[in-house]
Amino acid sequence: MTQWRKQRATGDVIIVRNADDGAPGFQHQDDAERFLEQLRERLGKYGLELHPEKTRLIEFERYAAERRKKRGKGKPETFNFPGFTHICGTSRKTGCFTVG
C-alpha cells in the first residue's frame, strides 16, 4: 500500500493498520476506487479475495454529512475498526467535525 500511495495516488492517503486489518483513507474518491480495484486484482493473482462484508468505500470526512444531505442521502455511514464504531459527528462545544 505504501508503494501504491507513493507511485499512484493524486491526493493524500492515510493508512491505519491493526494486525491483519487495515483502514485506508483517501483524499480523492477516484484514488480510493482505483486502489480497491487494483488491490482486488493483486490479491486475485494469489487466489485471495477481500472479505465482502468488511470491504466497502464510504464517505467519511469533515463535510460528509453536508454533501450527503445535498444529494438526498442520510447520515454518513459508520464503520468498525478495530472493535470501535467510528461515527462522523460534531463537537457539542464548537460544532466542529469530530470522529465519535
Image: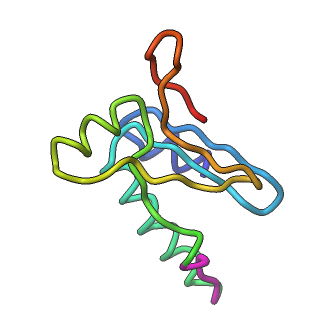
- Hey, which residue is sitting farthest bottom in the picture? 47
The x and y percentages for residue 53 are 56, 76
Write down the region rendered in magenta. 47-52
> Observer-nearest residue: 16 or 3?
16
Q: Residue at x 61, y 51 (%)?
A: 23
Where is 6 relative to 98, above or below?
Answer: below
Judge left or right: residue 67 versus residue 50.
left
Where is 27 relative to 90, above or below?
Answer: below
The quadrant in which residue 87 appears is top right
The x and y percentages for residue 44 are 55, 83
Q: Overall secondary structure of the magenta stretch?
A: loop
Inspect the magenta stretch and tell me whether residue 50 lies in it: yes
Q: Residue at x 53, y 26 (%)?
A: 98
Where is 87 relative to 43, above or below?
Answer: above
- Hey, which residue is sitting farthest front in the picture? 92
- Hey, which residue is sitting farthest right in the picture? 19
> Observer-nearest residue: 60 or 69?
69
Q: Residue at x 36, y 59 (%)?
A: 33
Quadrant location, the C terminus: top right
Colour scheme of the picture: rainbow
Inspect the magenta stretch and tell me whether residue 1 lies in it: no
> Observer-nearest residue: 19 or 97?
97
Looking at the rendered structure, the number of numbered marks drawn on it comes to: 0
The x and y percentages for residue 67 are 24, 39
The x and y percentages for residue 4 are 52, 50
Q: Residue at x 40, y 37 (%)?
A: 27
